[in-house]
Image (tube, rainbow, N blue to C red):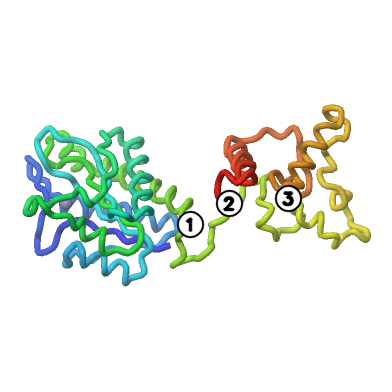
Amino acid sequence: MRIGIDAGHGKDGDPGGVGPSGLKEADVTQSLAVELGNLILALGHDVFLCDRSLYASERAVQASKAGCDVLISLHTNSGSASAQGIEAWFAHGNEEGKRLAGAILGVLISETGAVSRGIKDDADWHPASDPNWTGGMGVLRYFPGPAVLLELLFISNPQEEELLRSGEYLKKCAHAIALGLLDFINSWKGRSRADPGKGEREELPGFKDPGSGGSSGSPEDLLSGEDSGGGSSPSRLDPFPDLSPTLWEGKARRIVLALYDLGIITGYEDGTFRPDQPITRMEAVSLVYRALNYLGKVPAL
Ligand SMILES: [Zn+2]
């Protein structure tokens, strides 16, 4: 996956907002973009930094042409000396962009403790020069995929300006943005440009999706019959040999095999069920999801 990063402002020396003690938005966004870019690279994704000699909407077009799947535009807010908090903008009608904005804002707020101003639809954005403007934000509208514009704190607020001056604080923000981005990517169905299919089907240890097939010793192999003529292990003929037929007076095995037949549960890769193995919260959630999927209440993964 290739992630475009736009360090807001900087064209022809445009400083963006300037804080009461002189901190420039363009310098903050540049530092943050470098931090964020390095983190995303470390997480195994590709990064494209937009050319700051371009206008905002041109940067979006450039990022798209460069093959970016996602665009993140970094800004700091400006207003009164007491205004505070973080907000995330998405392009009107771009549902994945909205989800991206929510994912990143959520982590930013929990990691920094900043005031949340919420996610915002860019149809409600009006530049100071045109209060009647309804065309949204160019940097969001000219990018075809999920895009978000982050307004990180108010540089006009002396306390928040001090935070924005701190390298440690910007590191924390970059970390939060990267985590939110990962959350988004991991649950993004529409991604296909850079690495189609990769990671779309998440497998949890011990609860392999029946549809994923493939690896040796999985329950699918147990039913294929390939080894029926003298398999080396009894487990290859009998699902869950470690599940005692007398447990719960025999009900345990009947329950498990019934759910196994429906594809709601599966065993471990080695064919065992391990009835006394503790279940993790993620495995529990996966199990509930699979059951609801069977009932048609939630879409398949
Ligand atoms: Zn800005």
- 266 over 254 or under it: above or below: below
How far from the left and from the top, in percent, is residue 276? 74, 32
Q: Amino acid at mark 1?
A: Lys
Mark 2 surroundings within 10 Å by alpha-carbon count, few (fewer than 14), some (14 through 19), many (20 or more): few
Q: Is residue 238 left or right of residue 207?
A: right
The residue shown at (39%, 46%) is: 180
Q: Element type at marker 3?
A: loop
The quarter of the image holding the N terminus is bottom left
Task: Report how far apart the C-alphas of labels 3 and 1 lie in the structure.
Answer: 26 Å
Residue 144 quadrant: bottom left
Task: Report how far apart the C-alphas of labels 1 and 2 lie in the structure.
Answer: 11 Å
Pointer 1 with pointer 2, Cβ within 8 A: no
The residue shown at (21%, 40%) is: 153
State the count of labels.
3
Q: Element type at marker 1?
A: loop
- The residue singled out by tag 3 in the image is 269
Q: Is residue 290 left or right of residue 43?
A: right
Mark 1 surroundings within 10 Å by alpha-carbon count, few (fewer than 14), some (14 through 19), many (20 or more): few
- The residue singled out by tag 2 in the image is 300
Residue 6 quadrant: bottom left
Q: Amino acid at mark 2?
A: Ala
Q: Element type at marker 2?
A: loop
Q: In the rendered image, is residue 291 in sight?
A: yes
How far from the left and from the top, in percent, is residue 117? 25, 38
How far from the left and from the top, in percent, is residue 201? 57, 55
Q: In the rendered image, is residue 37 in sight?
A: no
Q: Is residue 294 left or right of residue 180?
A: right
- The residue singled out by tag 1 in the image is 189
Residue at far bottom of view: 65
Q: Amino acid at mark 3?
A: Glu
| Disc 2 C-beta below 8 A from ligand 1 | no
